[in-house]
Image (tube, grey):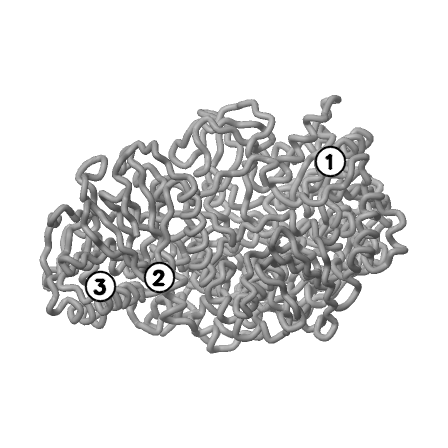
Amino acid sequence: MTALPEPFASWLGRRGWNLRAHQTELLELGRAGKSALLVAPTGAGKTLAGFLPSLVDLAADPRAGLHTVYVSPLKALAIDVHRNVEKPIAEMDLQIRAESRTGDTPASKRARQRKSPPHILMTTPESLALLLSYPDARDFFAKLRVVIVDEIHALAGTKRGDLLSLGLARLADIAPQARRVGLSATVAEPPSLARFLASGLDATPAIVMGAAGAKPQVTILVPEARIPWAGHTAVHALPEVYLALKAARAAIVFVNTRAQAEICFRELWKLNDDNLAIGLHHGSLAPEQRRKIEAAMAAGKLRAVVATSSLDLGIDWGDVDLVVQIGAPKGAARLLQRIGRANHRLDDPSRAILVPGNRFEMLECRAALVALDAHEIDAAPQPPGALDVLAQHLLGASCSEAFDETAMYEQVRRAAPYAALDRETFDRTLGFVADGGYALAAYERYKRLKRDETGKWIVATPLAQRQYRLNVGTIVETPMLNVAFRRGKRLGKVEENFVLGLEPGDTFGFAGQVLRYEGMRETTVEVSRAKDDQPRIPIYAGARMPFTAELAARVRGILSDPASWRDLPRDVKEWLALQRRKSEMPGREGLLVETFPRHGKWFLIAYCFAGRNAHQTLGMLLTKRMERDGLRPLGFVASDYSIAVWSTRPVDRPSELFAEDMLGDDLEEWLADSSMLRRAFRNVAVIAGLIERRHPGEEKTGRQVTFSSDLIYDVLRKHEPDHILLRATRADAATGLIDLARLAAMLRAARGKLRHRRLERVSPLAVPVLLEVGREAIYGEAIEDALADAAQAEALIADAMIDDDQDDDSQAELF
Amino acid sequence: MHARITIEETALFADPAGALFWPATKTLIVADLHLEKGSSFAAKGVPLPPYDTRATLDALQRLIRRYTPERVVCLGDSFHDKDAGKRIAPADRDHLARMMKGLDWVWVLGNHDPQIPPDLGGRVVPEIAEGKLIFRHEPAGPVLALGEIVGHFHPKACVVTKLGRVVAPCFTTDGRRMVMPAFGAYTGGLDTLDRAISGLFGRTRWRVLMTGRDNLHLFPAGRLEPIVRRAPKPGQE
C-alpha cells in the first residue's frame, strides 16, 4: 500500500481518519494516471476519494493552470463540494485555488476565471459546455489533468448526460492527457457507466467498488387516519410525521414535486406548536434562498427541511438522522439514494420513514422495501444519444474553432451515447445546424455555419454565437417569472402560466409563504405578504418521476400474494380482500381487464402496471380502436398502475382490443396528432436551437400573441416528415412521454393471457384511477367530435334556459 | 362544412379554415396571412421550416376552388414584414400570382405591411366599406362599429369538452361585428376572453365560432374557459 505523503498523512492522523480501501485504490490509480469509476453508497467518502489524488498532485507540484475540472449535476452540489474541498486546503495550508462556476456565478467572476483559471474548478455540464464553446477553450484546458464526474449515475442516460458525453469527447481531443474519475451511487450496471465516463478515451476506466454500508432501517408510516383512495400529499399522516420530526435531531422530508413541497411545508407549520426550525428547499426558489437553507442545515440550525429532488444528491450534512419520504418512491434506486441522505456515515444505518399518500402507494412503498431487502436496484435505461443535443453541441463547437466534419463525426462517435451514430444522421444533424437542413434550400442566405477557406465548418455570425450561449443546456422549462417583494428580496420563480391565471389581489402559496399578487413590474411578479388558509399553489410542468418496471413487478407480486398482506393497514387489507371477492387480483403475469356499467356508461379498467406514460399512449390507441368498432368511447384516464376507458357501448372482447397490432398503423396515425409528440417536439426544437428559449423581458406577459411550436410542428410534419428534428422527436417520445418500449413489452407479455371479468359494478381496485381526472388537451379527430358534442350540449342548455331578460337586443342569428 | 351567419343583416358563410365568404358580392375574406413569417425568423438566425408561405397559399387556393369568388380581400398583415416580398421563394410568388389572376384582389393594409410588394398586383386600400359592412385590419375606435369586420387580433378560444380541453382559432362576433381568426400557417393566437378582444364588443353579448377541422362550432362567451388555466385551489384538484 502506498504511503500518503505529507502534509496529508499528518492531516488525516490529526483528524483520526484512516483512508478506506477504495480511497487508497483511487489514489494509486491516480498516481498511475489511470481513469476510475468509483461505485459506492452515500457516506463512503466518495468526494474525498475523488479529490485526494488531485490535491496530492497539486501539493507536490503547484503549477499554474487548470488541473482538475469537477462536474456535478447540481449547482448546489458543486458549491457544497467546493466548500468541502476548501477545508483540507485551508487546514493543510495548501497553495491550491479552487473555485466554482455555475449559471449563478457573477459575470465578472466568470470573466476573471477565463483569464486566470483556478487549479480546481467545480462546475455543471452546461457551464462546461459553455467553456468549451469559447475560442480560447484549447488554452483554458491545455494543462488539464483530471476530470471528475460526480453522481454520474444521475447524468448517464439523460440529455444532460448526452451533452456531457459530447463535452468529454471534445475534452479528450483538447486535453488527451486528462484522466477521468467517476463517482456513482450503487447502480445495477457499473460497466455501462464506465463506458459513459470514458467518452473520448481509448482505455476503459477501472471500476472500484466501495464496501456496502450498514443496512438502512426503513419503516412505513401507518397513520391513525384512514388511508386515502387518491392523492399524493399524505396530509392525513402529517401529524405522525410531525411527531417523528420532533423526535429526530435533524430530518429531510422528501416529496416528489415542488407543489407538494409547498403544501407539505405549510401543513407541517400548521402543526408546529413547538416552533421547530423547519425549512423548505426546491428548485424554483431563488438561489440565495436555497443557499441560506443549505447553510442553515449544514450549521445544524434546522430541525427539518422539506425538499424535492433538489436535495436528492450529494450535499453532505452529517447530522441528518432521519429521512421521510412523502408519497410513493417510484423506484428502488431513487429511494436508496434518498434514504442515504440520513446519517452520512457509512457504518451507521440510515433511518427512514415512508409515508404513502394513498392505497396503491402503500403497496408501492411496501414493494420498495422488499426490493431494498433483496438489494435489487432498478436498471436505468440508456437510450442512444439525442440528436437535438448533438445539434446544440455542434453549434457550440463551431463557436470555439473551425472543425472538419469527418473528424468531428469520429469525435462524436467516441462519446458513449453516440457510439452507434451513422454518418447520414450526423450529416443531416450538421445540415440542420448549418441552415435548417430543409429539402427546400430556402435559407442559403441565413446560414448559422459556414465553411472557412480550408473547408472546415465555423459559426457564421456573432448572432448565432450569442444564440448558442443563451440557449445552452437541455432542460426546457416553461417560461418562468421571478417572484419578489416590492423593492425587496427575490423569492424564486413560478411558471408564467400560473401568473397569467392570477388577478391582482389573489393569494398564492410560494417559498413557504402566503403571498398576494400585486402586479407585474417588467418580468417580476410583485407580491406582498398575505393571509389565506387555502392559497393557490403553483404547479410546475416538469416530468413526473417514472415508475420503474422492477418496482411495478414487485407491486404485482404483493397483490397476488395474500399472505403478504398480513401486516398491511386494515383499510388496505379490506380493500384488497374485497377486490378478491368482487373480482380478482391482477396477478404477477398476464393482464386483468374488468368491465362494468356505471351511470349509463360502460367502463373498462386494465391493470397494466406499465407506468403513466405508457398508459396514456394505450388510452389514445384504445379509444381510437373503440371508435372504429362503434363502441363510442367517451374518455380515458391513466395512472401508474392502471387505465380506465369509458364508452357508450360495452367492450365485449377485450382480447381483440388489446392485440399487439395496435402498435402498427393506429399508432402512426395517432402519433402524428398526439399532444405528447407536440410536447416532445417543443423540447427538441428548443434544445436544437430551432426555436429560442423565451427569455424574460423579451415579450411582455399577457397581451402578446403567442406563437406556439405546434404551428411549426404541423407545417414541418406536412411538408418534410423526415426532417431530422421530427426523427429526434419520435425517438424522444418513444422512450419518454409515450413510452412505446414499455407499452410494447406489456402487450407482448399479455398476449394470450388476458383475463376478462364482467362485473356488475365498479371494483374496489378500480376506484383510485377513476378518482383521477383526465386533463390532457386533445388533438386530431377527437377535437371535431368533442367540439360538436359540446356545442350540441350547449344548444340543449340554451333551449332549456331561454333568457327573456337580455341586456342587448341584437341576438345574433347564427346558423 | 361552412356555417351561415348574419352580420348586420348581411348573409355570410364562415369557413372552418378561418375565412369568410360573402355570397352576394362573391367575396372571399381572409385575415392575417403573415406570409414569410418563417423566413423573417430565419433572417434572425432561427431557421424555422420554410414551408409556411406554401402552406398558407395552399389553404387559400383550396378556398378559392370551393367558393369561386370574384374578389379576394386580404384583411391586413398579409406579409409578415416589409422585406417579405424580397424573401418570398419564386415558386410561392408564382403560385400567388397565378391565384390572383382574373380576380379582383384587394390588399387591405395592416400594421405589419404598410407596403405590399409593389410588383405583385392587386389593389391596395386602407379599408373597404360596402353595404352594411366595413372591412378593416384594425378597429377604428375602442369598440367595434356596427358592421365592422377586423383581423389583427388572432382570436383563439378554449372550451372544456368531455374528452378534454380544446383550444382553437375562432371567429368572435355579436352578430353585428366580428373579429376574424388569423389565416397564416405560423400565426399564433390571443385568448378571445382577453380584454383586448372581448372589450371590442362593449357590453353586448358575443359568441365564438370555433374552427374544427371540418366544421365550425358555436359557443356563447360564458361557455369559454381561459386558455391559461387558473391555478386550482387545493382540494379542487
Residue linked to disc 1: A236
Kindly indicate whether the residues beneath marks 3 and 1 are on one polypeptide chain.
no
Q: Is residue A497 above or below residue A406?
A: above
What is the spatial separation of the Cα atoms under label 2 and label 3, in whole angstroms?
14 Å
Closer to viewer: mark 1 or mark 2: 1
How packed is label 3: few (under 14 Cα within 10 Å), some, or many (20 or more)?
Answer: some
Find residue A178 and report its image quarter: bottom right
Q: Is residue B70 above or below residue A46?
A: below
Residue linked to disc 2: B48
Amino acid marked by disc 1: His
Disc 1, SS = helix
Kindly indicate whether the residues beneath marks 1 and 2 are on one polypeptide chain.
no
What is the spatial separation of the Cα atoms under label 3 and label 1, in whole angstroms?
63 Å
Q: Is residue A678 above or below residue A255?
A: below
Q: Is residue B176 above or below residue A530?
A: below
- A571 vs B84, left or right, is right
Residue linked to disc 3: B87
What is the spatial separation of the Cα atoms under label 1 and label 2, in whole angstroms?
50 Å
Label pair 1/2, CB-CB below 8 angstroms: no
Residue B12, position in %: x, y?
22, 54
Residue A490, position in %: x, y?
50, 31
